Amino acid sequence: MLRLPVAQEYERQGMDMNVKNCRGCGRIFNYVAGPVLCQVCREGLEAKFQEVKEYIRQNPGVGINEVSVACDVSPSQVQQWLREERLEVTEDSPIFLTCESCGANIRCGKYCDKCKNTMASELRGAMRSYNTHPEKKEPKKDPRDNPRMRYL
């Protein structure tokens, strides 16, 4: 990882600075969360998304490759937007995504409704189990029970 004098100064003062290289342009920036892209590249990617969304509205039923060529975006980026549920495949489209759990055909996202519901119920069950058997904690002692001194 590259270190900058500014980052070293932050570390000396006890502050954390997560410096990374942008995957889009290679510039160094302070990474906070999400994709490893600087603010300029994030804004550019969002502009491309809006362009793709508008192109799909004007040309219903287009395929990923056609959108990719027309809007100068990689097919993998279009598929990522589908997985992120920012775009959705129409019901009559020959294009489909597959559920990462069971392999069923889906229109967007990573999981089909059945698998989402199964995972949600398993999580609820785990939370219920945790709530019925919490870690045993020592009861807090009341400071008024101190045998050495009493207050009136």
Image (cartoon, helix red, strand yellow):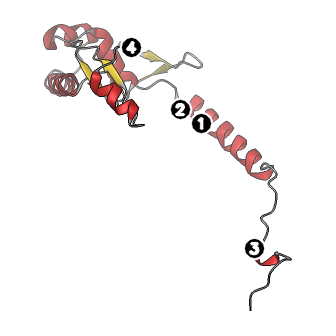
Q: Position of residue 140 (x, y in %)?
A: 77, 64
Q: Amino acid at mark 3?
A: Pro
Asked if marks 2 and 1 touch (Cβ < 8 Å), the reply is yes
> SS for tag 1?
helix
How dense is the environment of label 3, judged by Cα within 10 Å: few (below 14), some, or many (20 and up)? Answer: few
Q: Nearer the viewer, residue 107 or 132?
A: 132
Numbered label attached to residue 1: 4
> SS for tag 2?
helix
Q: Earlier in the sequence, mark 1 or mark 4?
A: 4
Q: Amino acid at mark 2?
A: Asp
Q: Would you name the residue on which mark 2 appears? A: 113
Q: Earlier in the sequence, mark 2 or mark 4?
A: 4
Q: Would you name the residue on which mark 1 appears? A: 117
Q: Nearer the viewer, residue 19 or 146?
A: 146
Q: CA distance from mark 3 to mark 4?
A: 50 Å
- Horizontally, residue 76 falls left or right of residue 40, namely right
Q: Earlier in the sequence, mark 3 or mark 1?
A: 1
Q: Would you name the residue on which mark 3 appears? A: 143
- Horizontally, residue 33 falls left or right of residue 120, namely left
At 48% from the left edge and 23% from the top edge, which residue is drawn?
110
Single out the mark in the foreground, 2 or 3. Answer: 3
